[in-house]
Image (tube, rainbow, N blue to C red):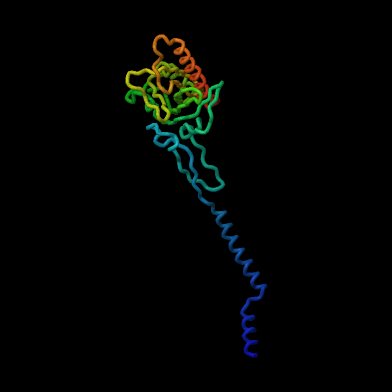
Amino acid sequence: MTIQRGAHARADDEQPPTGHRAVGERRRLALLWSVVAVLAVGGVWVVATSPHQGETETGTPSGDKLQTTAVVAGHPAPPLTESQSFVAERYFPAQRAYEYDGYRARRSASREGADCAAVQNDKTRNVLADLDCQGWIGVALTRGDQPVVSSVTVLRFHDAGAAAKALQTVRDKAADFEFTYPEGLFAPAEGVRPMSATRVELVGHHITLTVSRYLDQRAGDAPGKTDKAGEAEEVLALSNRSAAAVAGMPFMWM
């Protein structure tokens, strides 16, 4: 019996008093908060992504263009330059519905580039040479209620004066610029001239070139169907006017 009591006594002696245990917990918490405070003062590095022009001269889709920038937590990332932010997704987001005066369409393709010769049919002859073109965006807007697609090309210039100087050249050479096709639609056979409607507008230091065609790229109705041909031309003309208005809206106040 005496031996058992001694064993119990030693076991009780080995357990630290409650007050000592509380002091130890407080010390550990104080050490933890000290580490957190040091990390907060020193700063934490994070990675942010933002759109940029990368490989713009090849006219690749805008969704592939991302720039990686290291910033310190609590400090804003440096603002993008105008050339870095001149991408289709900024001005013509894929998720937006494009509506104007009964016209309703969706963005069905997009691309952009820094070299304005890249959006021209003949890459060996730049019709905008010496006219200070700084970059371009190309989008396709496909109507939901009509089999019509509009190709919108936005040309960016150094300032409004340079854009105004280039306006007549773009109007005269509108056919020299590429049509932006939605997925699944390709250029017509050589020699085929699809029925189309075209508008060229000056918007601040940008020029918008809008060309509308039917998805079947019809060249026109057969003789004797003038009424249908007239209706088809009217649909294209109205689509083109609305698509051109939509194209100019993002740049109207710039």
Q: Foreground residue, 60 or 202?
A: 60
Q: Foreground residue, 81 or 180?
A: 180
Tell me which residue sits at (55%, 23%) in the image: 100
Spot the residue most to the front.
224
Residue 157 seen from this side: no
On the image, the x and y values in percent for residue 167 come to 45, 18
Spot the residue most to the right.
19
Left or right, 19 with respect to 186, comes to right
Tell me which residue sits at (62%, 67%) in the image: 25
Q: Foreground residue, 216 or 85?
A: 216
Residue 138 seen from this side: yes
On the image, the x and y values in percent for residue 173 come to 39, 18
Tell me which residue sits at (63%, 76%) in the image: 16
Q: Foreground residue, 179 or 38?
A: 179
On the image, the x and y values in percent for residue 14 come to 61, 79
Left or right, 129 with respect to 103, comes to left
Q: Which quadrant is the N terminus positioned in?
A: bottom right
On the image, the x and y values in percent for residue 179 come to 40, 24
Left or right, 236 with respect to 3, comes to left
Left or right, 233 with respect to 3, comes to left
Is 153 situated above or below 1?
Answer: above
Is 1 situated above or below 162?
Answer: below
Spot the residue most to the bottom.
2
Specify the quadrant of the image occupied by residue 4. bottom right
- Number of numbered discs on residues: 0
